[in-house]
Amino acid sequence: MLIDAHVHLDKYGDLLEEALRQIDTERIFTVATAMDVPSYLELQKIGERSELVLPTFGIHPRRAAEYADRLPEISRYIEMSPAIGEIGLDFHWVKDTSTYSAQRKVLEYFIAAAAEQNKFVNLHTKAGEKEILHLLEKYDVRRAIIHWYSGPRDILHAMIDFGCYFTIGVEVLYSDHIKAIAKLIPDHLLLTETDNPGALKWLKKNDEIGMPMAIKKVVEALAELRRSTPGQIEDLVHGNLTSLLANDPALKASVITLFRRPLT
Ligand SMILES: [Zn+2]
C-alpha cells in the first residue's frame, strides 16, 4: 500500500471527489493533517468516506497566534484525534516575529498532550528544527514524523539518532538539496508524503493542483536515488508506517486492521 503521511485533504474543494477516488483506487493510506479547528472538523467528515483516510488534529504554526489564548478550548479536539498534526514552528516563511512566542506556546501544549496521550505527531519544522528536537527530547515523544525536512544537517542527524521518521515529498523531484536529504534518511525511518493539494503549486509557482497520485512519482524518485525499485520503496515505507502505528492505543480498530493485513 502507498503511504501519503502528510496531506491537506480539506483543501481540495471541487476536486475532493477525484482525490478520494485516487486514494481508493490506488490504495493510498492518507494521514490527513489539519491546519486549525475548522479544518479538522472538515477532515473528520472526509475521513468517514474512506477507510484509508486518517484525519488528525493540529494547529499549524501560521495559525498559532489565533489559538494561543484558547488552548483549553481545543483540548477536546486533541483528545478526539488519533494523532497530532500539523503542528510545529515556522520562523522562516512566517515573517511576523510577534507570532513566534504564540507558536512556541501552542506547539509545547500539543507536544505535552501527545506525550500524555501517547499519540504520534506530524511536524512542520522550518527554521525551528533545533527547538523542536529539544521539545521532543524534553517530553520523550519518540513517535514523530518530521514533514518535508530541509534544515541543517547536524540537527537532521540528531533527529535520526532520536528515532524521528521523515516524510520525503514532491520536492525530491526538483531539488538537489532535498535529494541529498532523501539519501541520508535510514531505511527504517523513511516515509512519503505529498503535502498536496498545494505543494506543487507552491514549488513551481503555477496553478498546478497536486493530486494524491503524485505519491507515485515520489516513490519512483526515491527508488532511483536509493538504488531500489518502486515496489521495494512502497513496501519499505508501508512497513515503517506499520511500525510507527504498532500497538497504538489511540487508533481505531479499522486502521489497525488495515496495517495488520499482509502488504498489498
Ligand atoms: Zn502541511
Image (tube, rainbow, N blue to C red):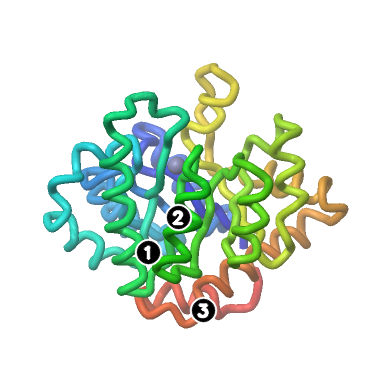
Residue at mark 3: 246
Tell how many labels. Answer: 3
The residue sitting at 54% across, 17% down in the picture is 206
Q: Is residue 249 above or below residue 128?
A: below
Q: Secondary structure at mark 2?
A: strand
Residue farthest toward the top in the current orientation of the protein = 206
Q: Which residue is mark 1?
A: 83
Which one is nearer the viewer's eye here, 40 or 156? 156
| Neighbour tally class for label 2: few under 14, some 14-19, many 20 plus, Cα within 10 Å | many
Mark 3 or mark 1: name the one nearer the start of the chain: 1
Going by the numbered disc 2, the residue's amino acid type is Asn
The residue where tag 2 is placed is 122
Q: Foreground: 137 or 84? A: 137
The secondary structure type at the circle numbered 1 is: loop
Name which of mark 2 and mark 1 comes first in the sequence. 1
Helix, strand or loop at mark 3: loop
